[in-house]
Amino acid sequence: MTATRWLAEYAWLPDHAEPTADVLIETADGRISAVTPLAGGSGVDTGVEVLDDAVRLPGLTLPGLANAHSHAFHRALRGRTHGGRGDFWTWRDRMYAVAQRLDPDSYLALARAVYAEMALAGVTCVGEFHYVHHNPDGTPYAEANAMGEALVEAAAHAGIRITLLDTCYLTATVDGEPLAGPQRRFGDGDALRWAERIDAYRPDDDHVRVGAAIHSVRAVPAGQLATVAGWADRHAAPLHVHLSEQPAENDACRAVHGCTPARLLADRGALGPATTAVHATHLTSGDLTLLGDAGTGVCLCPTTERDLADGIGPARRMADVGLPLSLGSDSHAVIDLFEEARAVELDERLRTRRRGHFSAAELRDAVTVGGHAALGWRDAGRLAVGARADLVTVRLDSPRTAGVPPVGVWFAAGAADVTHVVVDGRTVVRDGRHLTVDVPAELTAAIEEVAS
Ligand SMILES: [Zn+2]
């Protein structure tokens, strides 16, 4: 891989409250090799020579954005679930109907288009919370990890990194009802067989990591939580879990186990610094303390929580007790991490009727370095020497961003304002176009295959 020089009109450097003008970023072999603020000049009178060969990046260049929570196939439901009333549970029935139609080929085509849509939005790494493992009747594919492999291949086609969060999903309810109907293809029987299956999958591509997930306390019996947590621990892998997305989950957990889901996870060894709780919308004060003491992170998914009428998580209180925050587009009602980032602040305003809860740098960290860390990529998400060469450039001359100061990007820009995306030193998006995937055409075709 050759070395490249990039000249950013503005770049947001680590530990800076605001972006810096005129920054030369040099990359080699997929890493950032030098970051040089040119102190107010683009090379003409700064003494830094040979800038003619630098790729100019007009606008604001950010580190790569991490989408820390995705179910790729949910993208097929966008715009199709608003016809009637209903709640999370009625939405879930529609989602299961799509899950029933997937096979490794159709899922590869759909996920490739979805991940390419993410790349266009500035996402350089996705955390795929993957549980559609088997044939619709629950029998394994000849290649037991065929569906996971399709997702990993899809990310490669789209040019982004992936952490495949292989999800243990064993039961339908907190009190252990067996999987039935469309849920059968999610299950491995028990946690040991889940572990055996993923142990057999050892991808050696450098764009993929494998992590573990507990679908929820509904889907993994208390006695098997430690098996999943132990697997993640032995492999030094991230462990993700849907936590307290719904009040009904809390009520069922209290009825069966006499405690909150967070307490159950803590008692079974599933909370720790490698754990990320997804949603964590309906936490008690005691739950917040438990997560804080364990060093557990939280992935907020505000546009999905909004879409599904789930509620608003206590984001500021989470940050105040030291929980590292990350963000995900989850059901992909929207794939726009600028929207997720501003929602963290704006939802807090709606709840408290006060403004000014999160700084722009805090929102940047959640969507960049925080998300990458939650997915096990601790060398990504910063414009710093040695970090992965991920660059995301946002134009500041669109109808949405014209006249906006660079620090105001979270409150003005959207995915459509991303012009240039570099992942591990490779250009994936140029001038707002994905270089290898016709995203609208492929989304249309792939969704026609699987949607009702
Ligand atoms: Zn989810």
Image: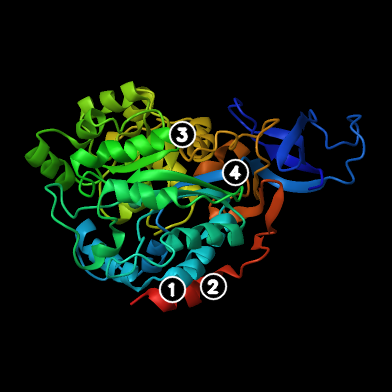
Earlier along the polypeptide chain: callout 4 or callout 2? 4
In the foreground, 364 or 372: 372
- Identify whether 102 is placed above or below 157: below
Q: How far apart are marks 4 and 2 (CA)?
A: 24 Å
Q: Count residues near mark 3 (Cα–Cα under 10 Å), then give few for <14, some for 14-19, many for 20+.
A: few
Q: Which percent across, then down, holds residue 174?
A: 15, 47
- Identify whether 26 is placed above or below 419: above
Labelled pair 4, 2 in contact (Cβ < 8 Å): no
Dot 3 corresponds to which residue?
Answer: 236
What kind of element bears circle 4? Answer: loop
Q: Count residues near mark 4 (Cα–Cα under 10 Å), then give few for <14, some for 14-19, many for 20+.
A: many
At x 40%, y 37%, the residue is: 232
Earlier along the polypeptide chain: callout 1 or callout 2? 2
In the foreground, 395 or 24: 24
Q: Distance between the residues labelled 1 and 2?
A: 8 Å
Q: How far apart are marks 1 and 3 (CA)?
A: 36 Å
Q: Is residue 369 left or right of residue 70?
A: right
Amino acid type for the residue under numbered disc 1: Ile
Dot 2 corresponds to which residue?
Answer: 442
Dot 1 corresponds to which residue?
Answer: 447
Amino acid type for the residue under numbered disc 2: Glu
Q: In this view, does 394 lie to the left or right of 292?
A: right
In the foreground, 109 or 133: 133
